[in-house]
Amino acid sequence: MTLFRFVTIAMALSTSLAWADDALDKAAQDPNQWVLPLGSYSGIRHSSLTQINAKTAPKLRVAWTMSTGTLRGQEGQPLVVGDMMYFESSYPNFVYAINLDKVGEIAWKFAPEQDKFSPSVACCDLVNKGVAYADGKILVTTLDDHVYALDAKTGKVVWTATNGDPQLGQTMTMAPLIVHDKVIVGISGGEYGVRGYLTAFDLKTGKMVWRANNVGPDADILFDPVKTIDGATQQPVGKDSSTKTWNMDEWKLGGGTTWGWYTYDPQLNLVYYGSGNPGTWNPSQRAGDNKWSTTLLARNPDTGVAAWAYQMTPHDAWDYDGINESVLTESQIDGATVPTLTHFDRNGFSYLLDRRNGKLLRAYKFDPTTNWAKEIDLKTGRPVLNPDKMTKEDVNVKDICPAAQGAKNHQPASYDPKSKLFYVGTNHICMDYQAFSVKYRGGFPYVGATLSMFPADHGDVRGRLIAYSSITGETKWSVNEKFQVYSGPLTTDGGVLFYGTLDGWFKAADQATGKTLYQFKAPSGIIGNTMTYMHKGKQYLAVLTGVGGWAAIGLAEGLTKGTEGLGAVGLTTSLADYTNLGGTLVVFSLE
């Protein structure tokens, strides 16, 4: 083979592999569309649209609505690709296509047949975080562990793949991420002894390309003992970096599931995501750091091999999943511009890392009541623990902040490149936590703890919307809410941010102050994420309303005992006085 022919083939292969994310990256820069679940590969959830601004926001009105046909929590957001809108409901995961020129019609609907056992092993409501788009296909995950590629024009199935087994407690609730020719998805089920992993399927065929566990032997977790870096120490992780941090074979039930959001840096060719809590919730059953649960990981999307891993909560004794999104920005650190990653963790700390190597640069409490740890030691990368808040078997540890639901859960943050601030929907909650011994049985809960959650400060504030700097740790302003702010904010160049509340208010707020400029009482509470787009010269906002998720699990499943719903029910007993179940897509525009 001549050198010329070799180079030509290599270039063609490179072009083929890069097509999907090149096209998506370019389309994501068009503010008229919303082509990725988080709006962009960087996950900043910011739009440059300005038609709706601080002056015009009070003139917002409902443009049109549509029922999702389901009652459980609506956690995702629509996509807009060209003149088409696509969105997915909660279980049974209906997928809809709407021609924006004909909003009164459904262009097509996909209703997958599902394993009816899967709802019984869904930990925290029958939710879904939305669809993805690439190469003329809509990519879908379903609760019963299937991945579908649908023809975007017709809704017909192009291929389907299986990513897990509900009989083992495995479910899927995350939105896919498309990178190169890979469809990257994760798995849920940490409360059922599921060992978490990330899987890449071929975009054209659905064939599995690679799978990377987060805990276990090096060959399973795709760690190179010499080349994969421990972000905390900035040294190679070494041989058996995960298994040697678990007693005996507890890693086989080790949790570390991947049900959150994923982001991607095309320049570094790295996918970023977080792993969930270790199994069981009883820390006395699993001595050691339990790596690599509650960890931020960076992987090569083509091979799955990990570049680095940074564990935020070693030996997690509070259920502080690390699955929250990693927002990619550029930061000024000691006079230099550094490609950084900002992560607001369930454990109440914001983390600023160098995304090239996982080095910790800054860490601050973003909820002032956080007390399980005093601080994060920047030299070691480890939390400085408060021994009074360490949980252990058969001891009821009181007043731990934040609660297991986190100072922030899955609700994605927004970053405004102009103000250089993050706008974050947070939880302001604490808990009592009593661990107990538990045995594993496939498909049954593997929790081992009884929790009670309550408002921080023992008041009537369970949520806060904050404007925050991850470089200084300063909260510029905060807005208190009666219930957790479980809806992902959206910021815009119009100087207005948009978010929803658990009791059903859709709000437009001044980014400079947090002051409400407009509000609308939605048909149900909001745990979905606002997105925006332009159609025929008019800016629209769209949000899925429909209360549920862990924040409202009592209402979603009809639970009344305070410790039910993994301790969350007692936190929101009054929520039924303000809202009810029911999924609706609500679209706003100016009068």
Image: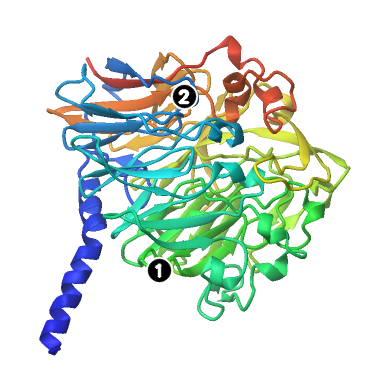
Asked whether, in this view, residue 369 is left or right of residue 224, the answer is: right
Quadrant hosting residue 340: bottom left
Amino acid found under the numbered disc labelled 1: Thr
Quadrant hosting residue 118: top right
Q: CA distance from mark 2 to mark 1?
A: 37 Å
In the rendered view, would you say 431 is above or below 585? below
Task: Check disc 1 and report its element: helix, strand or loop.
Answer: loop
Q: Residue at x 53, y 52 (%)?
A: 472
> Of callouts 2 and 1, which one flags the residue occurring earlier in the amino acid sequence?
1
As drawn, the residue found furthest toward the top would be 577
Amino acid found under the numbered disc labelled 2: Ile
Residue 52 in sight here? no
Residue 283 position within the rendered picture, expressed as x and y whole percent measured from the top left: 78, 52
Q: Residue at x 16, y 32 (%)?
A: 83
Q: Which residue is mark 2?
A: 526
In the rendered view, would you say 331 is above or below 171? below
Asked whether, in this view, residue 312 is left or right of residue 296, the answer is: right
**Residue 303: mark:** 1
Q: Quadrant of the C terminus?
A: top left
Q: Residues within 10 Å of mark 2 (few under 14, many from 20)?
A: many
